[in-house]
Amino acid sequence: MNNEVVFIGLGNMGLPMALNLVRSGLTVSGHDLLPASVEKFTTGGGTTTTNLQSALAEAKIIITMLPASRHVESAYLGDTGILAKANPQALLIDCSTIAPETARKVAAAAREKGFDMLDAPVSGGTGGATAGTLTFMVGGSQQAFAIAKPILEKMGKAIFHAGESGAGQTVKVCNNMLLGILMIGTSEAIRLGMANGMDPKVLSEVMAKSSGRNWVLEVYNPCPGVMENAPASKEYSGGFGVDLMLKDLGLAMENSLSTGSSTPLGSLARNLYDIHSKTGAGGLDFSSIFNMLAKSN
Ligand code: NAD
């Protein structure tokens, strides 16, 4: 086999992840619908081919990092999809954030054709993708996880086996729903303190050492100027977009409905990010929800 790894989806996350695999010494064939992304990959030392189907037939590991459920279904299923073209000896790893139901459906179709497939969504953002410090939450068989782990370790530093197919996506959905809620709650608390004349830096420092402590206060403060490296201090650029958070909260709400769960704060958070996105903030970092909570005069 010429290509050890075929990597499909060289966007904000996929490109740095695939380049970390190249740097680790693996032969990686990179593919994306956008020629400019493929060019960035080959400039960084990766290889590519116009004949994706032959690359798929030769690959030992196939990794996808695509935007949403529908892209994953179309990449894997159908006459020209990965399941039709790859060698069933290949291990399939989908790192996209998608609905747990879709992950289970695609993994079941893969199993029918003799493939082992893992859902392996990530946390850690573009910074973690570049630094190779992502957290992977993986669903699928223990045996497939054992084969995938050393590959995932080249892109991340915390690799968890969450359970059977779809379990990785379930953890991701729960985590991001909590993060969306925490961002809004933290923003509210800082705004309340500021309305009382508090310095947001002092307030944040104290809360970060008190019982309101959380990841947003520790590393991702939503108030401009409190943390030099947080997106809030860079006009909410970079980081994790409002529309991606909205997508993940949508997945959480779909899942909540289908499982009969009670998620009132998740639902409220989805609605607030939706309103925020509709004001034109969809491309800003999700911590920009802080702007929506400004004090009325
Ligand atoms: P992105 O839009 O930057 O990249 C997706 C890439 O997939 C694009 O380059 C697109 O051209 C390509 N693509 C789409 N369909 C394709 C197909 N059929 N064949 C080949 N290429 C195809 O998105 P991203 O920010 O890299 O995110 C990817 C996934 O990771 C999403 O599910 C997202 O929710 C998740 N995620 C993103 C972040 C983040 O901070 N950006 C963090 C964690 C998880």
Image (cartoon, rainbow, N blue to C red):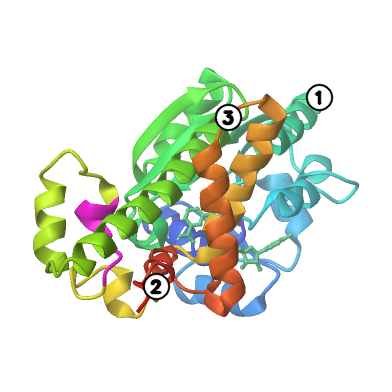
Secondary structure of residue under mark 1: helix
Residue 147 relative to residue 231: left or right: right
Q: Is residue 73 above or below residue 37?
A: above
Residue 211 position, x and y percent, is: 17, 38
Asked if the magenta segment contains residue 255, the reply would be no
Please tell me in which quadrant of the rendered image residue 10 appears. bottom right
Q: CA distance from mark 2 to mark 1?
A: 49 Å
Contact between labelled residues 3 and 2, with CB atoms less than 8 Å apart: no
Magenta highlight on residue 220: yes
**22 up-or-down from 233: above or below:** above
86 vs 275, left or right, is right
Q: Position of residue 100 (x, y in %)?
A: 64, 35
Mark closer to the observer (3, 1): 3
Answer yes or no: disc 1 within 8 Å of ligand 1: no
**What residue would you read off at disc 1?**
112
Q: CA distance from mark 3 to mark 1?
A: 34 Å
Q: Amino acid at mark 3?
A: Ser
Q: Which residues are magenta?
A: 216-223
Report if the CB atoms under discs 3 and 1 are less than 8 Å apart: no
Residue 187 seen from this side: yes
The residue tagged 2 is 291
Figure label count: 3
144, 273: nearer the viewer: 273
